[in-house]
Amino acid sequence: MRWRRSASAAPWGTIACFLAPALTIYVALTIYPILRTIYNSFLQIRPRGREAFVGWENYAVLFADPTFWRSAAHTVLWAIVAPVVDVAVGLLLALCLYAAIPFSRFFRVAWFAPVLISYVVVAIMWSWIYNFDWGLVNLGLAAFGLEDWRRTWLGDPNFALAALIVVDVWKWTGFNMIVCLAALHALPREVMEAAELDNCGWMAKLYYVAVPMIGSTLIGLLVLGFIGKMKVFDLVWIMTRGGPLWSTETVSTYVYKRAFDWNTFDLGYPSAIATVWFAVILACVIAATAYGRRRPQLEY
């Protein structure tokens, strides 16, 4: 009896041996940096290890910092607009491929290709496209007689943020297209054929059948896109560095500037910004997860 109980007991020693390497890396590279950043947010950190506890002072400065609120507004706007456009255009392209338009294999590769390009290459390429003198955008406008619409897209505070969002949408639409196409191909043919027998038009079939049935996929893409855009950094830093006049500043670029680019040598305040933004993103993830669990699932 004793032998049976020991044989059926969980081999905790073996489990710990297998989990230890992964847990060690996770704690060292994820948990510790998070906890250290939160701890640093209550300090004023100077070079050569000089630290002073300042309590909630960094947070008081943060909530009165207009640049932080401006960068937060830009980031939230980006995180809401870009995923919606990404998913809408991706779904439209997926429907084109699902309907087997001519040269669909070529378009599948061409539309997905931007996803494979690094942010550095994308940023340099679109900086050329937006060039005032010889960029494709202004040359195209001039070709259609729209000379008054030409402008320095990345140098105009009124258009710079929109110009960056367009680049981001261009890069990630192909990813959403592939996911939507996979979801469309997973739909049961019987349901689609039944809709055709009921004389459903193309739009009716799309609105009442296809979109509701792949609704979970679309919501998942929106949530993933929202979380990713809340951390946007690479594209902004390479193309505009948050300028002109803070018009494209995001929270990530602002944290980097305050930590390393302004030569303030104080890591306490940037840690406070990072902590607040981490809490905002975590709250959004929890809310999205709760909404996804409560949302009724369509069975077919």
Image (cartoon, rainbow, N blue to C red):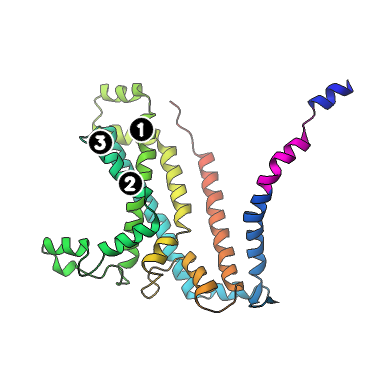
The residue at 36%/30% (across/down) is 185
**Label 2 near label 1: C-beta < 8 Å?**
no
Q: What amino acid is at disc 1?
A: Leu
For residue 53, say whether it is visible: no
Q: Distance between the residues labelled 2 and 3?
A: 14 Å
For the point 41% across and 70% down, which residue is it? 241
Question: Is 238 rendered above or below residue 176?
Answer: below
The one nearer the camera, 296 or 92, is 92
Sequence-first disc among 2 and 3: 3
Q: Gap between marks 1 and 2, in whole Å?
A: 21 Å
Q: Is residue 190 above or below residue 295?
A: above
Query: Viewer-nearest of labels 1 and 3?
Result: 3
Q: Which amino acid does label 3 sit on?
A: Ser
* Above or below, comparing residue 155 to residue 182 in the picture: below
Label 2 Cα crowd, 10 Å radius (few <14 / some 14-19 / many 20+): some
Query: Disc 1 versus disc 3: distance between alpha carbons?
Result: 15 Å
The residue singled out by tag 1 in the image is 184
Query: Residue 141: which disc?
Result: none
Image coordinates for residue 43, horizontal then vertical, percent: 66, 73
Quarter of the image with the C terminus in it = top left
User: Where does residue 76 sit, x and y in percent of width and height?
Assistant: 44, 60
Residue with the most extreme right position: 2
On the image, which quarter does residue 183 sit in? Answer: top left
The magenta span reads: 9-23
Q: Mark 3 points at which residue?
A: 104
Label for residue 113? 2
* In-front residue for pair 107/153: 107
Mark 1 vs mark 2: in front:
2
Residue 12 x, y percent position in the rendering: 77, 36
Disc 1 and disc 3 in contact, CB within 8 angstroms: no
Mark in front: 2 vs 3? 2
